[in-house]
Amino acid sequence: MKTFNNPIIPGFYPDPSICRVDEDYYLVTSTFEYFPGVPIFHSKDLVNWRQIGHVLDRPSQLNLDGTPNSRGIYAPTIRYNNGVFYMVTTFVVSATGTRINFYVTATDPSGPWSDPNWLEDAPGIDPSLFFDEDGKVYYTGNRVPPEGPQYPKHVEIWMQEIDLEKKQLVGPKYSLWDGALKQIHAQEAPHLYKINGWYYLLIAEGGTGFTHSATIARSKSITGPYEVCKTNPILTHRHLGRGYPIQSVGHADIVETQNGEWWMVCLATRPYGGNYRNLGRETFLVPFIWEEGWPVVNPGKGIIEGEMPFPNLTEKRWGSEAVCDHFENPELDLKWNFIRTPRDQFWSLLERPGFLRLKNKKEVITEEVNPCFVGRRQQHMNFSVRTKMEFLPMNNGEVAGLVLLQNHNYHMRLEYGLEDHKTSIRLIKRNGGKDQLLAYIPLKVGILYIKVEAVGQSYSFYYGTSSEEWKVVHENVDGTILSSDVAGGFVGAYIGMYATSNGYESNNFVDFDWFEYVGY
């Protein structure tokens, strides 16, 4: 029997939403404070995915200035109707500030997508759109119940018609459902579907951690009342214990294939090295059937497995991704991200062809700003990263190198730079906002090779002055600070290239010749 392995998209790709257009499938995920926002993937078989762009790839679409870590873009939904793609999402301005909901449109899923259509009086997070058979379109989200919460984090799912010509919500708001699992809290991520004459409302409950789950209700009328599925939750792993390799399962969306199969995408985590989740929340795939009008996920087992039967679709592989980026293209590969919206061109692939040039900005990665950082997600528990850089620090404070990042207060920096008029390699571990110097090696070079190897939660750092002649900086550093279990928040770990002048204006720069990431 042909099988596939979960997750289908490894690494920090949470809150998946999916739609089908004929024989093509499209999927989007959350990005929080990273830019560009909302990666969009394409598949022919639900298993093999390739990224075709970002939905929010222009500063006019996504202003992340001042956005704290783990805020920003939450839980996008992608839908398709009459030749137009819609992506609706929440922009979380701050930890306690406004949640603003908006949607964008495109006729080509790879872009360009429109500028945001901001929706007034649309409380809550995790919006979705539903296109009914009569031509009406409905918006769903969550909110505090109008009569007030009955327990901590008690919210309800609400719905309102949306006029896409006027680009605004219209008519009354309807309270649809406050979930199946009273006291579990955090009813969110609502998706509406109409299947065999029933309206189905699929939501997430229990928060996005260990108690996460998916529950469902149905009604003959879109406004309710909604009948609760007696087998709820239809998917969760919280009963399997904290030693189970796949946890935090929830936040689901469903799709029917052209061959009549039903599949569910959802988020889950793969803790390791003592139940730490450096990889963040990832995208998983699981089949389900309909039984007496209700979904039965992975019949006979009811859980997500690491290896599962392949969909009844012709497999379409896109080719393996190159492990090494030689920076030979005029634009950055889609895997690369910035922290918050870049407001100046601090990177270039054209000034020195075949190199990524990063300019030493005064902004530092220890603050919630837009530093000179170009990074990609950690996607494997075990990996090796190598890079070659050319850098001549001219002034005190100018440094460049690699950063393994959870957020501004939790990360590790392997830097080469100038301090007290002396050049050196330094390994700095930042834990809870405090820097700890783990290694200091006096050195003066123009070309430097640096490497990070991770085996589970053990991270080791090396340098070389020529290719493949590695010397130890520090080995077996505890990497659990790169997990949200230590650092808080909702994002996974990144690793990337970094340059700063530590608060001073600088005209200096560093050239990276290549960047290699090998997961195993």
Image (cartoon, rainbow, N blue to C red):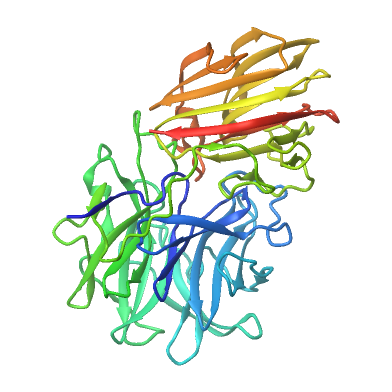
Residue nearer the viewer, 286 or 390: 390
Vertical position of residue 437 compared to residue 497: above or below: above
The residue most toward the left is 300
Vertical position of residue 165 compared to residue 217: above or below: below
Instruction: Specify the quadrant of the image occupied by residue 260.
Output: bottom left
Instruction: Specify the quadrant of the image occupied by residue 388.
Output: top right
- Residue 29 vs residue 223: left or right? right
Residue nearer the viewer, 304 or 242: 304
Query: How many marks can you see?
Result: 0
- Residue 24 vs residue 231: left or right? right
- Residue 212 vs residue 312: left or right? right
Pick the quarter of the image with the C terminus. top left
Q: Position of residue 155 (x, y in %)?
A: 45, 64
Vertical position of residue 102 compared to residue 305: above or below: below
Residue 152 seen by the camera: no
Q: Position of residue 115 (x, y in %)?
A: 69, 68
Pick the quarter of the image with the N terminus. bottom left
Q: Residue at x 32, y 45 (%)?
A: 247
